[in-house]
Image (cartoon, rainbow, N blue to C red):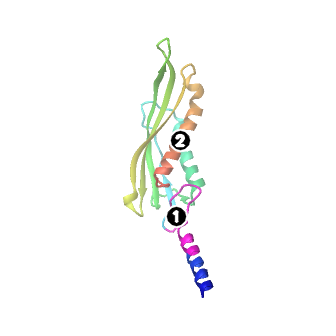
Amino acid sequence: MKRIIMILTLLAGVAMWQACIPKYTLNGAAIDYSVYRSISFSDFPIRAALVYPPLQQLFENKMIDMVTQQTRLRVLDNPNTDLRMEGEISGYSLSPQAVGEDAYASQTRLTITVRIRYIDNKNPNLSKDQSFSAYRDFSSSEMLSDVQDDLCNQICNDLTDLIFNATLGDW
């Protein structure tokens, strides 16, 4: 009898331990795929005072790549999907950061701001309208045209991470 109680206690302990194990996804997405199956993206036009034309396509491609690589959602060209992302590139600015001994800026900061409207057609309470900014500093001795492509690429990576975590990652 003592042995049966011990076995039952052990089995109950294992069952409770199994129930307490949290489930994580490796990609950070918090999506219920039984509810959400598709997503669409609109164009993200540049509405900033300064315009770097390749930025729009770069950002759009990085957003779509992030979603296709990190989720099982189908990206469709149809606005009637379960989820939708739209918005604009609302800021592209340069600002001096560090001042050298000669009173000239030794570092310049490139900041990009994107406004996102995340529309959840299944649960409108989860929809968001939010702006995200990211930046990179570069030496003022360098010409912006020489470092712009690399900086925009790095900043777009940061922006897509921030946007993914705030929307699909539900952080």
Q: Residue at x 60, y 80 (%)?
A: 6
Residue 15 sits above or below residue 111 on the image: below
Return the x and y of residue 3 as percentages of the image width and height.
Answer: 62, 84
Q: Is residue 113 magenta?
A: no
Residue 135 sits above or below residue 164 on the image: above
Disc 2 and disc 1: Cα gap in Å? 25 Å
Q: Residue at x 42, y 64 (%)?
A: 122
Q: Residue at x 57, y 50 (%)?
A: 66
Task: For marks 2 and 1, give the one nearer the viewer.
Answer: 2
Return the x and y of residue 106 as percentages of the image width and height.
Answer: 52, 19
Type of amino acid at the residue the image marks with label 2: Asp
Q: Which residue is mark 2?
A: 158
Return the x and y of residue 18 as percentages of the image width and height.
Answer: 57, 71
Q: Determine the residue located farthest toward the front in the rendered image.
A: 2
69 sits to left or right of 38: right
Type of amino acid at the residue the image marks with label 1: Arg
Residue 57 seen from this side = no
In this rendered view, identify the residue nearer to me: 67 or 45.
67
Bin the neighbour count of mark 1 within 10 Å (Cα to Cα): few under 14, some 14-19, many 20 and up.
Answer: some
Q: Which residue is mark 1?
A: 37
Q: Residue at x 54, y 73 (%)?
A: 16
As helix, strand or loop, the secondary structure at mark 1 comes to: loop
Residue 72 sits above or below residue 2 on the image: above
**What secondary structure is the magenta-colored segment mainly?**
loop
Q: Which residues are magenta?
A: 13-34
Quadrant of the rendering where the N terminus is positioned = bottom right
90 sits to left or right of 161: left
Residue 143 seen from this side = yes
As helix, strand or loop, the secondary structure at mark 2 comes to: helix
Image-quadrant location for residue 14: bottom right
Image-quadrant location for residue 142: top right
